[in-house]
Image (cartoon, grey):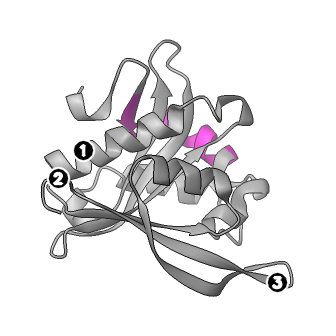
Amino acid sequence: MSKYLQNNTIKLRALEPEDLELLYNWENDSSIWGLSNTLVPYSKFALKNYIENSSKDIFEAKQLRLIIELNKTKEAIGTIDLFDIDFYNSRAGVGILIAEKKHRKLGYAHKSLKLLATYVFEYLGLFQLYCDISEDNLNSLKLFESLGFKTTGKKEKWTKKGNLFDNVLFLQLFCKSES
């Protein structure tokens, strides 16, 4: 296993066919749809195809989804994603999910994001990571800011929540060796 994708607590690993049921449950948990802008449920067929295609070259797919797994128990607790990977402009979007409340606020998201940032900057050689976070998602803002992400923009009334619209903050993290 790459030194970039694990530490003494967790490892970030590729999707496996055995993850189908897990992804099916996580992707269809409507309580978190608002965080990922999901509007409809995913079928097992669609997720099976997604897993099968996840082995595509990162340069072709322009995305990477990794499972966050606890080292001791081998339990999968969430996912961390790179998306819209743009090698020319040297940047990628990042998103993270710790699926169950019992695993939240235990430092797993922080450790996962830190591992991923190191992998992106030192191994992939990208210059920046970015994310969009709802202005009222204080836990996510605190997580990303704790790793050095800075708010560089605000999208007014960007996402619909019921009959209202939420503001979304745009955060960026730049590679320290280049900034």
Question: Disc 3 marks which amino acid?
Answer: Leu
Residue hosting label 1: 119
Q: Position of residue 128 (x, y in %)?
A: 27, 64
Decide which of tag 1 and tag 3 comes sooner along the chain: 1
Decide which of tag 3 and tag 2 comes sooner along the chain: 2
Residue 15 visible in image: no
Count neighbours of disc 1 (C-alpha within 10 A) and say few if under 14, some if 14 to 19, many if 20 or more.
some
Q: Is residue 176 magenta?
A: no
Q: Is residue 13 magenta?
A: yes
Question: Disc 2 marks which amino acid?
Answer: Leu
Could you tell me if the residues under marks 1 and 2 are in contact, i.e. CB atoms within 8 Å?
Answer: yes
Instruction: Give the numbered dot on residue 164.
Output: 3
Q: Position of residue 4 (x, y in %)?
A: 24, 35
> What's the distance in space between the residues labelled 1 and 2, CA to CA?
6 Å
Q: Is residue 175 left or right of residue 107?
A: left
Which residue is at a point 61% across and 64% down the rendered structure image? 36
Q: Position of residue 13 (x, y in %)?
A: 37, 35
Residue hosting label 2: 124
Which residue is at a point 52% across and 32% down the rendered structure image? 108
Q: Residue furthest right?
A: 163
Q: Is residue 78 left or right of residue 83?
A: right
Decide which of tag 1 and tag 2 comes sooner along the chain: 1
Which residue is at a point 66% across and 79% down the rendered structure image? 167
Question: Disc 1 marks which amino acid?
Answer: Tyr
From which residue to which does the magenta span run? Answer: 11-25
Q: Which quadrant is the C terminus positioned in? A: bottom left
Dominant secondary-structure state across the stretch colored magenta: helix
Q: Is residue 71 left or right of residue 105?
A: left
> What's the distance in space between the residues labelled 1 and 3, CA to CA?
38 Å
Q: Is residue 34 above or below residue 48?
A: below
